[in-house]
């Protein structure tokens, strides 16, 4: 399973916004973006004007890093979205939201998508009662995502669920925290994705 292994706080600083890659740390004063809200590197404080291709590239990189997807897989998602019916950008984001690691994160079983990816890869997650170890697995409406019986004693997961109760879950998901499971009520819509993403810039970038 390919993944980025470098320091993730630098990614938030590079994109100029919080990508919430470190879980609860992103909500605390220790957050690197809060302490140093400028790009990393020797010339990070220097103001540089980004135009045209640079704006499109930064938007694509931001979404890739947010969902923890590498370039080849992201491009594959885009090609499938371009061939499907509907608006390409909205379909692309819907596909990313349907990934199992993202659903586990949205339900509150994990504090970050990287932690959710680890839970899935290590066999802690079930879909409709069957173990799934593929983070990129796409869930469908009426599917049930649950924690395995042996994994429900994990204290870290319990802490994450308590936090999720306070923050809430998206409307397209239904969480039953006591049963350690969630249901996909419907496919996510563009309005369900509240992060500041300009997907049209990504469409323009790949359409050149």
Image (cartoon, rainbow, N blue to C red):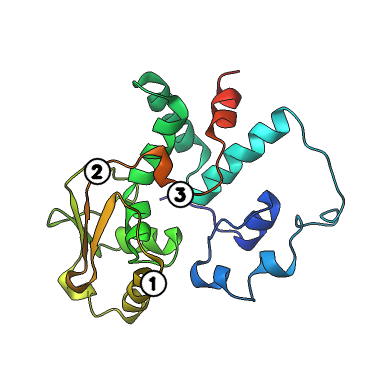
Residue that mark 3 sits on: 2
Residue 118, image x, y percentages? 37, 62
Q: Earlier in the sequence, mark 3 or mark 2?
A: 3
Q: Quadrant of the C terminus?
A: top right
Q: Earlier in the sequence, mark 3 or mark 1?
A: 3
| Tag of residue 166 | 1
Secondary-structure class at tag 1: helix
Asked if residue 127 shows in the view, the reply is yes
Residue 185, image x, y percentages? 22, 48
Q: CA distance from mark 3 to mark 2?
A: 29 Å
Secondary-structure class at tag 2: loop
Q: Quadrant of residue 32?
A: bottom right
Establish if 78 lies above or below 104: above
Q: CA distance from mark 3 to mark 1?
A: 33 Å
Residue lying furthest left: 129
Residue that mark 2 sits on: 186
* Residue at horizontal 44 percent and vertical 37 percent from the top: 73
Crowd rating for badge 1 (residues with CA inside 10 Å; few <14, some 14–19, many 20+): few
Q: Is residue 165 left or right of residue 46?
A: left
| Front-lying residue, 53 or 135 | 53
Q: Earlier in the sequence, mark 1 or mark 2?
A: 1
Crowd rating for badge 2 (residues with CA inside 10 Å; few <14, some 14–19, many 20+): some
């Amino acid at each position: 399973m390919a993944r980025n292994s470098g320091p993730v706080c630098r990614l938030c600083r590079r994109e100029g916004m919080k990508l919430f890659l470190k879980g609860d740390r992103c909500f605390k004063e220790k957050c690197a973006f809060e302490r140093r809200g400028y790009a990393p590197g020797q010339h990070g404080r220097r103001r540089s004007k980004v135009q045209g291709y640079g704006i499109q590239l930064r938007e694509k990189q931001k979404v890739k890093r947010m969902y923890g997807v590498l370039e080849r897989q992201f491009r594959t998602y885009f090609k499938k979205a371009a061939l499907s019916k509907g608006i390409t950008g909205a379909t692309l984001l819907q596909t990313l939201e349907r990934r199992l690691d993202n659903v586990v994160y949205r339900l509150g079983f994990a504090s970050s998508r990287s932690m959710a990816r680890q839970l899935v890869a290590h066999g802690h997650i079930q879909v409709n009662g069957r173990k799934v170890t593929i983070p990129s697995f796409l869930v469908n409406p009426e599917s049930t995502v649950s924690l395995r019986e042996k994994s429900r004693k994990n204290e870290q997961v319990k802490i994450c669920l308590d936090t999720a109760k306070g923050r809430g879950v998206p409307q397209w998901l239904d969480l039953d925290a006591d049963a350690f499971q969630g249901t996909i009520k419907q496919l996510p819509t563009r309005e369900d994705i509240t992060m500041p993403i300009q997907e049209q810039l990504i469409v323009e970038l790949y359409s050149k």
